[in-house]
Image (spheres, coloured by chain):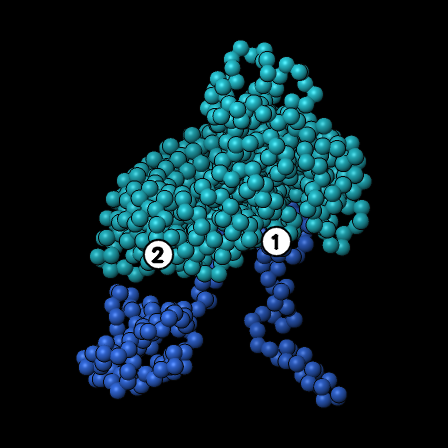
Chain colours: A cyan, B blue
């Protein structure tokens, strides 16, 4: 660190303050303070540090290299550039989470380009960019690829607006690329040619994930790439890669820690089968396995040898039956995280309960979300079975069609350490199917028992009582998702008044109105954001909120054909950057 | 004008004579919604107490973004259910051609159709198949890679067996082709 550079501190940060800013009351010289602070990595810790005093604020901003922005509109590129001179890694999140479920129209915003332009000016040595729910164009990707000579890692999750042409630019120009992680994006797939754009000299890749792209890539190019990237530790290929091709890749990369297979269905000769089995058993470091499209009992056994070391098994794209899952988990005693489709049924989950005592996270996705037939999927029985056998469970995402209050109460007694409890009873407003009562007591049990609860998603028939419980007991709650629930404003008020650590509140189709919205007037500045859609909020209340709280951005989107007075979709978030300047016409900034 | 009106009338009447499964007078969409609204008896009492939304006959799938499953995941699972309807695309390469093509085998009814299409696509003449001499007499021989990874001459096995075992096609040219013809 060049001391001369440091002395010319930005005048705006020392603005109204003491003339003796070089004479710190703090006994250590700046260099020591900065050395110590450069060891801090958590952005929450760094935030706290920066609030201690001006000197610490300055020392922290000079030593921060990783930037985390949870809401891209909470701050502007200019403000960021002024405060932090030395950023190497950026994480940016954009759209509200409900955009994943089509509740946010296209062209809403969260375009990364203005950020990239700023980064190119101020952080030419930028190495990492991680985007979630942002929009980016191929031009932006080309700009990114050509503006940062040391660029190493790109991760795109749930983003949209670009195509494989943009990926081509990255592959072509980023000579030191170590990570390319493309997940679940709304991307235009023009073919797999982008993979062939990696230069033959590129051997630095450590992470390559293109599992969610659909078109064929050149296997020849992929194989050569895998062969020369000796540090490759995460490889997730797409469906176009067949089993025998996978075997060839594994032979070159037995050091993999995470593997996403391609299609797991192919007619193999006995030799090919054996080769595949051998290839898997040679992967001694495998901790995570995913992909497995169209996997059947025919080929799953090739995995058994590798299952012993697995800690994460993602079967959420393989429609396995209970027996198939049972056999697989029987070989995987070290599983910590398991994602499955509900085709495995309660029986499959029973097997999980008996085979995976170390399980910490379970996600059960619906194979057919719109199917109403109660004979498919999982019920409270499966969840109960897992809770009996897996006492360390702390993260659950469970889609089911029936649940009871008693079952949930038992589940949290078995597993009191839940930090994330996301239960989705798929029929909106569904009561306890045995007693016909609301599911209030279920979530009451969750918040009373699980004192470490940070994230909660509720569902089923719920009255204000659920929210009274949440407000009273969920003292560590940070994120709450509500849909088709509650009886009156009182419900939402209880939550706003009772949950001191609440950061994100997202509500849809619930009878909360203006009184509820306005009861949180002082609360919203302590939160990242509030989303309310299809509730009972009117424009006048939103305008009032906007007027009273200048540091909040209050944005409204109206549905087509709805009453002028209704605020159909409301998005409220704190910001130091003022109202958005790039809002499309359908987003009203109040 | 009169004729047009009469024609339209006929179209309307066609519906009445249309062969369908179901009781006369019921509409397909009604049937679907009644199927979707089937509930166990214990739920019947509750459903009327709940607010009007729940009693609407529209299928649940119409609630936007519910259940909260990400679009990507929904699309993948949806494709899985529809995969039987998709085509049977295989790559076709021809020796000397700068790029490959792709064709959907399901589109063709027999070898004749397929070969004619290939001839058109690559502007070549493949000739007629004979069991004894293959495609002798032509510069080109159509071959395919089967499930075992072996390269076979197109035409030996019955058409149905061919389309299920064919992974890709290659139109061999010149001496290599002639070699096959002599087998």
Residue located 69% across and 47% down the image: A583
Left or right: B49 as drawn, with respect to A311: right
Q: Chain of mark 2?
A: A
Q: Extreme left residue here?
A: B183
Question: Along the line of sight, which residue is nearer the eye, A270 or A296?
Answer: A270
Residue A468 x %, y %: 66, 29
From the image, tell me which residue sits under label 2: A221
Left or right: A573 as drawn, with respect to A318: right
Disc 2 to disc 1: CB gap under 8 Å: no
Q: Chain of mark 1?
A: B
Residue located 58% across and 44% down the image: A117
Left or right: A474 as drawn, with respect to A126: right
Q: How many marks?
A: 2
Label 2: which secondary element: helix
> In the picture shown, does residue A96 fall above or below B58?
above
Residue A548 x %, y %: 78, 32
From the image, tell me which residue sits under label 1: B60
Label 1: which secondary element: helix
- Cα separation, mark 2 vs mark 1, equals 45 Å
- Tag nearer the camera, 2 or 1: 2
> Dot 2, crowdedness within 10 Å: few (<14), some or many (≥20)?
some
Same-subunit check for callouts 2 and 1: no
Residue A125 x %, y %: 49, 38
Residue A416 x %, y %: 49, 27
- Quadrant that contains the C terminus of chain A: top right
Location of residue A578 (image quadrant): top right
Location of residue A263 (image quadrant): bottom left
Residue located 64% across and 47% down the image: A109
Residue located 33% across and 67% down the image: B167
Is any atom of residue A297 visible in this view?
Answer: no
Question: Along the line of sight, which residue is nearer the eye, A188 or A201?
Answer: A201
């Amino acid at each position: 660190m060049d001391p001369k550079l440091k002395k010319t501190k930005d005048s705006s940060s020392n603005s109204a303050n003491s003339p003796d800013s070089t004479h710190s009351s703090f006994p250590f010289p700046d260099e020591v303070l900065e050395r110590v602070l450069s060891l801090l990595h958590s952005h929450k810790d760094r935030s706290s540090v920066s609030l201690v005093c001006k000197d610490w604020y300055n020392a922290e901003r000079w030593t921060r290299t990783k930037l985390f922005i949870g809401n891209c509109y909470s701050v502007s590129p200019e403000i960021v550039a002024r405060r932090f001179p030395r950023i190497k890694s950026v994480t940016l999140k954009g759209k509200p989470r409900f955009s994943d479920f089509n509740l946010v129209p296209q062209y809403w915003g969260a375009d990364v380009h203005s950020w990239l332009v700023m980064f190119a000016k101020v952080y030419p040595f930028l190495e990492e960019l991680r985007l979630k729910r942002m929009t980016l164009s191929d031009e932006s990707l080309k700009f990114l690829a050509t503006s940062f000579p040391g660029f190493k890692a790109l991760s795109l999750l749930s983003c949209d607006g670009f195509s494989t042409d943009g990926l081509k630019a990255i592959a072509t120009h980023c000579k030191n690329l170590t990570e390319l992680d493309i997940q679940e994006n709304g991307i235009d797939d023009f073919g797999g040619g982008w993979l062939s754009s990696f230069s033959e000299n590129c051997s630095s890749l450590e992470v390559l994930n293109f599992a969610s792209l659909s078109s064929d890539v050149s296997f020849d190019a992929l194989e050569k790439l895998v062969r020369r990237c000796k540090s490759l530790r995460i490889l997730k290929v797409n469906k176009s890669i067949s089993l025998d091709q996978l075997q060839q890749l594994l032979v070159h990369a037995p050091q993999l820690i995470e593997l996403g297979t391609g299609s797991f269905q192919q007619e193999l000769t006995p030799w090919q089968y054996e080769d595949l089995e051998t290839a898997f058993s040679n992967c001694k470091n495998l901790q995570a396995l995913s992909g497995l499209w169209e996997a059947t009992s025919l080929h799953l056994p090739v995995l058994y040898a590798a299952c012993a070391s697995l800690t994460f098994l993602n079967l959420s794209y393989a429609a396995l039956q209970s027996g198939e899952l049972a056999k697989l988990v029987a070989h995987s005693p070290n599983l910590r995280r398991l994602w499955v489709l509900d085709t495995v049924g309660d029986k499959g989950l029973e097997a999980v309960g008996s085979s995976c005592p170390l399980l910490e996270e379970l996600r059960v996705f619906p194979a057919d979300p719109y199917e109403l037939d109660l004979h498919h999927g999982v019920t409270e029985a499966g969840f109960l079975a897992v809770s009996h056998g897996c006492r360390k469970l702390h993260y659950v995402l469970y889609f089911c069609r029936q649940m009871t209050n008693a079952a949930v109460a038992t589940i949290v007694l078995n597993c009191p350490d839940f930090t994330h409890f996301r239960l989705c009873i798929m029929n909106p407003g569904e009561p306890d199917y045995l007693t016909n009562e609301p599911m209030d007591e279920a979530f009451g049990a969750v918040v009373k028992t699980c004192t470490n609860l940070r994230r909660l998603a509720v569902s089923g028939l719920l009255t204000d009582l659920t929210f009274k419980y949440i407000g009273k007991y969920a003292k560590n709650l940070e994120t709450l998702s509500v849909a088709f629930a509650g009886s009156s404003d009182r419900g939402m008020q209880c939550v706003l008044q009772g949950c001191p650590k609440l950061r994100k509140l997202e509500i849809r189709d619930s009878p909360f109105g203006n009184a509820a919205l306005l009861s949180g007037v002082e609360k919203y500045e302590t939160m990242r954001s509030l989303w309310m859609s299809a509730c009972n909020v009117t424009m006048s209340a939103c305008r009032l909120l906007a007027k009273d709280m200048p540091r909040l951005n209050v944005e409204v989107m109206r549905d087509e054909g709805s009453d002028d007075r209704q605020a159909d979709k409301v998005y409220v978030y704190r910001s130091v950057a003022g109202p958005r300047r790039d809002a499309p016409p359908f987003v009203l900034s109040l | 004008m009169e004729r047009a009106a009469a024609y339209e009338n006929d179209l309307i009447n066609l519906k009445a004579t249309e062969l369908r499964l179901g009781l006369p007078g019921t509409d397909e969409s009604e049937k679907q919604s009644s199927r979707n609204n089937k509930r166990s008896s214990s739920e019947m009492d509750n459903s009327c107490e709940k607010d009007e939304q729940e009693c609407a006959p529209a299928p649940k799938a119409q609630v936007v973004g519910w259940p909260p499953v990400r679009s990507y995941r929904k699309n993948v699972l949806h494709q899985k259910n529809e995969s039987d309807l998709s085509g049977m695309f295989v790559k076709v390469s021809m020796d000397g051609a700068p790029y490959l093509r792709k064709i959907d085998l399901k589109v063709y009814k027999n070898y004749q159709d397929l070969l004619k299409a290939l001839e058109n696509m690559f502007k070549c003449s493949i000739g007629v198949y004979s069991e004894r001499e293959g495609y002798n007499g032509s510069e080109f021989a159509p071959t395919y890679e089967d499930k075992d990874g072996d390269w076979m001459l197109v035409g030996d096995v019955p058409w149905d067996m061919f389309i299920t075992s064919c992974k890709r096609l290659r139109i061999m040219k010149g001496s290599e082709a002639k070699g096959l013809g002599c087998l």
